């Protein structure tokens, strides 16, 4: 159609339009009043529009984002965010909150500058608020506190850089139970004003509804006390809207039909429903403010369907006048609660374990997918070390970096990732992302070590000559770099890096193919070493899994492990060489084999610790420490719980990825037909036991160490009998522990547990095993009036103390039925190489030690940190004629040679950021009263920590480094508590003097800094 451009033509068109409107009848368009704010004398219903977007679960993170693979689940986050832009533009009073930065960043990178400007305006006006702000909504049971901090920091830094905002609210609405560390560390110490969550035990929720105590002041740390408490709220039911108020396309809730000319007009009915639901919730909530979470998983894919109904509800409910409805956010709600000047109930400790019904204890996922849990933990420690090496070398504008590994690790902290509650193809996707990140970080680590070994100059190294290899499959005895034929005139060079702030003396083990070898340190001094015959069990693991991972069969299995003790400086490396011995080389292990039926006694351990066994009862050992005078009978056994198979018609709850519901306990008897093998040597002793056809165990005692290492290889778990199995190892003593034991919270604080008891309510015991299981990331211990018994782990795991004096840990799960919690898949992990498919085999380690009462914390904290940050090995080779050690720096330490960190302090982040500044986090490892010597404040000297750099400026930040600490403290809300404070004087480190540069840390304190260093040009100018 062509329209005349003259003025008369335009007027004519306008008149025709007006006439047309008149002839067509009066418009029915209604302008809804959505501008209502808080009304002080009414019940205020805060309508919080949100979507909960799992960063992987039934589909992978990318499939969820683009909306592919919809045969599994119709979900597309891209549609959600696209749709929101138009919906928020339509009415400036509408509000929305968004959480998962892994999705938002994908979407943000796809947008035009025009759309970005619109979204930035939404953020400035408060229409769009970022809540939580991490890359994902991390789990709280199976995550390590360092990973929780890292993934939150990654999201927070993006939001600060792009929008200039700092999230105020914690929003952990879907994780399956809630940790003390989340409350005080990832809540108060991040700078959050409140924390909201959805899942607490059904018994606890019922009691809190009656007492109006769903909202509390949560003090998660005994050490930091009231200085790190937070307002916390559990939702009355879940994170969804009240029943009847779901408005996604095709949802079956009644809409608000307000056109009087059409059938089914229902405005008053819908208003009555709204008021009834609001009053019902008000009866279990304090103050005249309640929150409705208007959304759920992957909702608002067509946002207009929600906002059309919410507009109408706000308009008509407020016209009705009995209650006040408003568009809100958790920040507005928190401020309203604070303004009410109410006193709130006090909450300590945590919300574990979580059960949603009598036989529905979500304690199975503490162990589900144990291999992924181990992979995540390994990559976490590696990421910490890689960032340190990147800092020492200097971050490059191009080339390999740690960003990909950071992203893979961040996504893996999601509450359906490291938990093991995702579908198998999604688990594969998480592993793939970690592998891709590792490969790039591996390249960075190798080149950084090469640079540091070739030069210690401050100038940035560009192209080092030395080539290092690493061995990510070393645990299954596959390390091509160490499997050199040394008889061909080659020497193996091993650089050992220590990412901790204290010197370490530890045993390393590598596979070798030659038996006549010798080890020298960087000064050319021979190092005592030991050759350990390769166990047959490793041959099977190596051959199968190398082919599974690399697509090709490995070469012939090396005959030996070579073990020797290394000494490595803090934040530095040492160099060792392995070569052919001209005369006497490594000591071969003495091997003793005890046949079944043979009765004799033997002893392992060459230092203070001795284990004394009887071949007739090899699961029993007499534990003797001649230094501490601790002696105890220790029994280690294996058993399995059969997974419940849903045969109970009244409650057909199965065991599955989430839920642990045992259906009988079955002790696994030792296979007495297989000989017991004992190895002795100058470095370590080992006891090899074939427990049954699918469980193999190696017990180790190292020279100079006072703990026991137990390596277990479990699987494939047999299912030919049609029964799923949950495999447990149990370590028993004669100690009288009075039902009490202690488990860590995300690797940080230890929390007291009492069997069949809950602090906050009268606990009705329905599942005496599953209901007493707790998550373990660092360790578990028990004590009586004279002894402490500690067990440390190498990954997240579930465990308990079901009888006095014993500790049990669930090491593997293989189940045949789904537990009806949404994943719709049995936890039956299977590996395939060509047509050879087998159930998953899990290899892992646990460590135990007995100490006099009050003396166990030092080992738990120090050695626990060494488990998290294992020594990093890099391999190179040289010819006999090469003077490698004189052409390289054989030792290096990033800190002053006369300095090491205090025994109770650890560096958890040392990272050069994109803008050239440095992010440093220091953590105190001990709680108040945990150790008589180390539960005290300590000081770190920054000048000695960075001897090769000159500090220009130090800014103390909040935990996620998105605001200055002093600003965070200035804004902190101080809430009234019903109970008086229990903490007395809370210790905190003081301000950092810019001249002295001393950082003081009190027990359990973590301090975060952004540091600016002078550049080389600045130093030259100053000179």
Image (cartoon, rainbow, N blue to C red):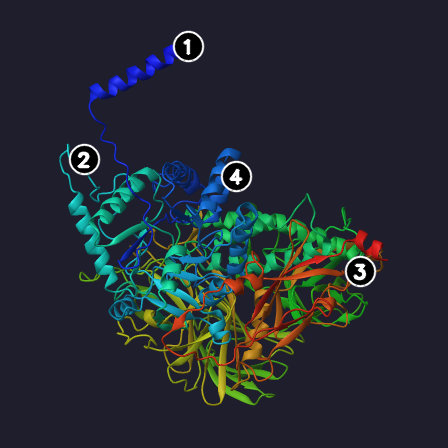
209 horizontally vs 939: left or right = left
Residue sitting at 41 percent across and 87 percent down? 736
Residue at which label 4 appears: 109
Task: Depth check: give the residue in front, 672 or 834.
Answer: 834
Provide residue 637's location: percent of width, then percent of height: 42, 75
Per the model, the C-alpha gap separating discs 3 and 4 is: 43 Å
Mark 3, other Cα within 10 Å: few <14 / some 14–19 / many ≥20: some
Which quadrant of the view contains residue 702?
Answer: bottom right
Which quadrant of the rendered structure holds the C terminus? bottom right
Of the numbered discs 4 and 1, the one sitting upstream in the chain is 1
Q: Which is more foreground, mark 1 or mark 3?
A: 1
SS label for mark 1:
loop
Provide residue 981's location: percent of width, then percent of height: 43, 78
Mark 4, other Cα within 10 Å: few <14 / some 14–19 / many ≥20: few
Q: Which is more foreground, mark 4 or mark 1?
A: 1
Of the numbered discs 3 and 4, the one sitting upstream in the chain is 4
Q: Is residue 162 above or below residue 921?
A: above
Residue at which label 1 appears: 6
12 horizontally vs 877: left or right = left
Per the model, the C-alpha gap separating discs 2 and 4 is: 42 Å
Residue at which label 3 appears: 889
């Amino acid at each position: 159609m062509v329209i005349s451009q003259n003025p008369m033509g335009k007027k004519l068109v306008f008149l025709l339009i007006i006439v047309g409107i008149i002839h067509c009848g009066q418009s029915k368009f209604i302008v809804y009043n959505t501008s209502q704010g808080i009304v002080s004398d009414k019940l205020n219903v805060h309508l919080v529009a949100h979507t909960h977007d799992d960063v992987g679960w039934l589909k992978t993170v990318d499939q969820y984002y683009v909306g592919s693979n919809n045969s599994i689940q119709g979900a597309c986050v891209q549609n959600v965010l696209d749709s929101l832009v138009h919906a928020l533009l339509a009415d400036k009073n509408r509000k929305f909150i968004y959480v998962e930065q892994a999705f938002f960043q994908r979407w943000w990178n796809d947008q035009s500058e025009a759309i970005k400007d619109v979204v930035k305006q939404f953020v400035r006006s408060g229409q769009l608020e970022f809540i939580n702000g991490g890359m994902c909504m991390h789990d709280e049971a199976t995550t390590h506190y360092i990973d929780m901090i890292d993934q939150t920091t990654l999201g927070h830094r993006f939001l600060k850089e792009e929008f200039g905002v700092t999230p105020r609210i914690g929003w952990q609405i879907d994780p399956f139970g809630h940790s003390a560390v989340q409350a005080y560390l990832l809540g108060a110490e991040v700078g959050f004003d409140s924390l909201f969550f959805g899942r607490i035990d059904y018994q606890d929720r019922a009691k809190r509804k009656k007492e109006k105590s769903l909202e509390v002041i949560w003090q998660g740390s005994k050490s930091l006390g009231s200085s790190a408490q937070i307002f916390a709220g559990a939702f009355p039911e879940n994170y969804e809207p009240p029943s009847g108020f779901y408005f996604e396309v095709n949802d079956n809730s009644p809409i608000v039909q307000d056109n009087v000319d059409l059938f089914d007009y229902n405005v008053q009915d819908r208003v009555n429903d709204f008021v009834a639901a609001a009053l019902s919730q008000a009866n279990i909530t304090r103050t005249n403010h309640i929150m409705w979470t208007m959304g759920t998983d992957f909702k608002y894919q067509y946002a207009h369907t929600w906002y059309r109904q919410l507009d109408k509800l706000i308009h008509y409910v407020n016209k009705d006048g009995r209650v006040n409805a408003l568009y809100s956010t958790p920040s507005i709600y928190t401020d309203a609660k604070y303004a009410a000047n109410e006193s709130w109930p006090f909450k300590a400790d945590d919300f574990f374990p979580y059960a949603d019904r009598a036989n529905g204890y979500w304690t199975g996922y503490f162990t589900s997918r144990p291999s992924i849990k181990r992979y995540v933990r390994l990559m976490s420690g590696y990421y910490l070390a890689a960032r340190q090496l990147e800092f020492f070398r200097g971050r490059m504008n191009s080339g390999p970096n740690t960003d990909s590994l950071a992203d893979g690790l961040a996504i893996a902290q999601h509450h359906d990732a490291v938990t093991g509650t995702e579908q198998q193809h999604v688990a594969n996707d998480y592993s793939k992302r970690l592998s891709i990140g590792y490969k790039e970080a591996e390249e960075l680590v190798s080149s950084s070590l090469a640079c540091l070994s070739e030069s210690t100059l401050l100038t940035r190294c560009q192209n080092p000559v030395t080539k290092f290899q690493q061995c990510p499959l070393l645990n299954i005895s596959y390390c091509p770099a160490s499997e050199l034929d040394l008889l061909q005139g080659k020497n193996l060079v091993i650089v050992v890096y220590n990412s901790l702030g204290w010197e370490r003396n530890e045993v390393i083990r590598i596979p070798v193919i030659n038996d006549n070898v010798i080890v020298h340190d960087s000064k050319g001094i021979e190092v005592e070493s030991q050759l350990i015959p390769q166990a047959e069990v490793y041959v099977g693991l190596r051959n199968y899994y190398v082919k599974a991972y690399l697509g090709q069969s490995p070469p012939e299995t090396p005959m030996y492990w070579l073990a020797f003790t290394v000494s490595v400086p803090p934040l530095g490396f040492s160099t060792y060489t392995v070569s052919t011995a001209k005369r006497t080389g490594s000591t071969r292990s003495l091997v003793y084999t005890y046949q079944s039926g043979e009765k004799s006694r033997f002893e392992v351990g060459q230092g203070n610790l001795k284990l004394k066994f009887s071949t007739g009862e090899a699961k029993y050992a007499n534990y003797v420490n001649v230094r501490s005078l601790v002696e105890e009978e220790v029994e280690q056994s294996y058993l399995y719980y059969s997974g419940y198979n849903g045969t109970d018609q009244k409650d057909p709850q199965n065991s599955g990825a989430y839920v642990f519901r045992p259906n009988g306990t079955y002790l696994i008897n030792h296979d007495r037909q297989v000989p017991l093998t004992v190895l002795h040597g100058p470095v370590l002793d080992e006891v090899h036991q074939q427990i049954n056809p699918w469980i193999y165990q190696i017990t180790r005692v190292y020279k100079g160490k006072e703990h026991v290492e137990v390596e277990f290889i479990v699987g494939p778990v047999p299912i030919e009998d049609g029964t799923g199995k949950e495999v447990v190892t149990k370590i028993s003593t004669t100690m009288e522990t009075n039902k009490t034991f202690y488990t860590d919270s995300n690797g940080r604080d230890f929390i007291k547990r009492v069997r069949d008891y809950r602090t906050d309510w009268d606990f009705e015991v329905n599942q005496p095993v599953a209901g007493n299981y707790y998550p373990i990331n660092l360790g578990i211990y028990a004590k009586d009036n004279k002894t402490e018994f500690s067990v440390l782990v190498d990954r997240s795991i579930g465990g308990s103390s079901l009888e006095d004096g014993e500790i049990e840990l669930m090491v593997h799960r293989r189940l045949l039925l789904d537990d009806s919690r949404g994943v719709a898949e049995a936890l039956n992990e299977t590996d395939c190489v060509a047509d050879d498919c087998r159930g998953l085999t899990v290899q892992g380690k646990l460590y135990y030690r007995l100490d006099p009462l009050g003396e166990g914390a030092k080992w738990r904290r120090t050695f626990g940190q060494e488990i998290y940050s294992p020594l990093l090995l890099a391999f190179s080779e040289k010819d006999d004629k090469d003077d490698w050690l004189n052409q390289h720096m054989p030792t290096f330490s990033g800190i002053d040679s006369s300095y090491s960190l205090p025994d109770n302090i650890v560096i958890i982040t040392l990272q050069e950021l994109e803008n050239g500044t440095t992010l440093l986090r220091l953590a105190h490892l001990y709680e108040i009263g945990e150790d008589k010597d180390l539960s005290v404040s300590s000081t770190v000297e920054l000048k000695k920590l960075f001897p090769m750099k000159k500090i220009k400026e130090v800014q103390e930040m909040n935990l996620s480094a998105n605001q200055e600490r002093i600003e965070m403290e200035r804004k902190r809300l101080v809430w009234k508590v019903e109970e008086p404070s229990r903490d007395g004087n809370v210790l905190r480190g003081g301000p950092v003097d810019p001249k002295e540069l001393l950082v003081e840390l009190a027990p359990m304190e973590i301090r975060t800094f952004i540091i600016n260093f002078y550049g080389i040009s600045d130093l030259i100018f100053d000179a």
